């Protein structure tokens, strides 16, 4: 009986989370894609708005509960020891990566792209298995391949479709640390390099979707997977990179991760079950506010430390992206531990809620 009740609760939470954290991303990305496909353009200066807004709205805050996440996943209260462990993790991994940017900015940028590819693919996989509920990703290898394939979409499709703008972002980020030479990364922006990148993305997407189609027990879940993949491909091939990344980071990736956190917090989960989204997200905002504010203060200190003081909008956004990269490394470590707790890579149906009876 307990197991049946737990399953019913989980199913109800998943339905609520689809409405609150999946549908908005679908609407935002498909609507923006349609606008650009119809020839509508947005002035360059306004394309930075979603990324700038993400400092306070969903983006930066989505990682501000890392100190509570694992405790909640284990159905325990956070202790001084657990908080210190997460703080130490951030200080060690984030600190080392930050120092790396000052001494090897090109390697730092390459690491940023790879790390973000892995992490955003990781987030895609969790949403597919829980909130969307696909059934065709049966094995760990399939899940790894799907995560990699999904991660290539925001990180590599814009490189193929908008090489000049992508290169501008790359040179801006490394330029904050005293160089505009992106070294061996320049080959990726050549016509041949872009063909190789495009071929790799197509092969990975086609392979994972074909294997999933062969193994699906019903077409609905696979259709959602294929439909989302197609939407993301067209979106990132059509919408200019800085706008596309801002919208995806805020309304797709961050919102889905916040939904995962809401499911773990008893108060927020109860609000979801009651259909009270305002109370659920209000609880998240309250919990995330202290560390979001602390992160903004650290960002201000980072501004004072970089060799080339940011002066233009693109340079300020570049600084923010570097800062996000620094925070992403320890954040990935926490999310990977959460994945392990919830069986994302191994269990037929990963847990959305904390473990019953733990």
Image (spheres, helix red, strand yellow):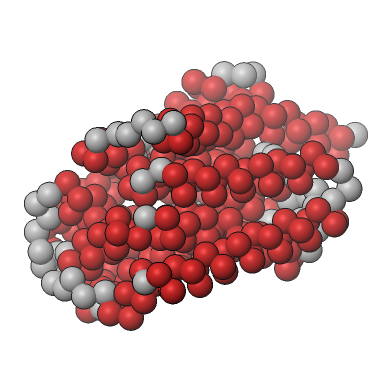
Closer to the camera in the image, 43 or 119: 43
18 in relation to 108, above or below = above
Which image quarter holds the N terminus? Answer: top right
Residue drawn at point x = 36 percent, y = 49 percent: 241
Determine whether, in the image, residue 260 is placed left or right of residue 255.
right
**Figure check: 130 above or below 275:** below
On screen, residue 141 versus residue 201, left or right, reads right
Q: How many numbered discs sit on the rendered protein?
A: 0
Residue 291, given in percent of the width and then of the height, sits at 34, 45
Q: Is residue 6 above or below residue 207?
A: above
Residue 86 horizontal/vertical position (percent):
44, 60
Instruction: Please name the residue shown 9% across and 59% down the image.
Output: 309
- Given residues 217 and 83, the one toward you in this image is 217
Give the camera-side residue of 264 and 166.
166
In the rendered image, residue 114, in percent from the top left (x then y), is placed at: 45, 68
Q: Is residue 21 above or below residue 236?
A: above
Q: Quadrant of residue 41?
A: top left
Q: Is residue 12 left or right of residue 149?
A: right
The quadrant holding residue 11 is top right
Q: Residue at x 64, y 65 (%)?
A: 204
């Amino acid at each position: 009986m307990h197991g049946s009740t737990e399953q019913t609760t989980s199913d109800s939470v998943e339905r609520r989370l689809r409405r609150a954290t999946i549908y908005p991303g679908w609407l935002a990305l498909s609507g923006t894609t349609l606008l650009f496909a119809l020839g509508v353009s947005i002035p360059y200066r306004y394309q930075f708005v979603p990324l700038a807004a993400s400092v306070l709205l969903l983006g930066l805050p989505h990682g501000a509960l890392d100190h509570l996440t694992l405790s909640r996943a284990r159905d325990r209260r956070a202790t001084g020891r657990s908080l210190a462990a997460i703080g130490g993790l951030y200080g060690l991994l984030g600190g080392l990566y930050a120092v790396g940017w000052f001494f090897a900015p090109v390697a730092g940028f390459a690491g940023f792209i790879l790390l973000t590819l892995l992490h955003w693919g990781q987030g895609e996989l969790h949403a597919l298995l829980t909130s969307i509920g696909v059934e065709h990703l049966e094995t760990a290898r399939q899940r790894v391949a799907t995560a990699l394939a999904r991660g290539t979409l925001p990180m590599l499709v814009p490189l193929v479709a908008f090489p000049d703008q992508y290169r501008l972002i790359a040179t801006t980020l490394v330029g904050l640390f005293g160089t505009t030479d992106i070294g061996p990364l320049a080959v990726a922006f050549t016509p041949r390099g872009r063909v190789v990148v495009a071929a790799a993305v197509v092969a990975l997407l086609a392979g994972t979707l074909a294997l999933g189609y062969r193994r699906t027990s019903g077409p609905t879940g696979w259709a959602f997977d294929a439909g989302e993949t197609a939407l993301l491909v067209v979106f990132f091939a059509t919408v200019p990179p800085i706008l596309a990344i801002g919208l995806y980071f805020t309304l797709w990736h961050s919102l889905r991760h916040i939904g995962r956190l809401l499911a773990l917090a008893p108060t927020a989960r109860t609000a979801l079950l009651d259909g009270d989204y305002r109370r659920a997200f209000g609880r998240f905002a309250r919990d995330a506010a202290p560390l979001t504010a602390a992160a903004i203060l650290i960002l201000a200190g980072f501004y004072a430390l970089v060799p080339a003081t940011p002066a233009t909008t693109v340079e300020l956004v570049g600084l923010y992206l570097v800062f996000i990269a620094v925070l992403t490394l320890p954040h990935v470590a926490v999310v990977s531990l959460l994945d392990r707790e919830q069986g994302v890579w191994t269990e037929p149906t990963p847990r959305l809620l904390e473990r019953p009876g733990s």
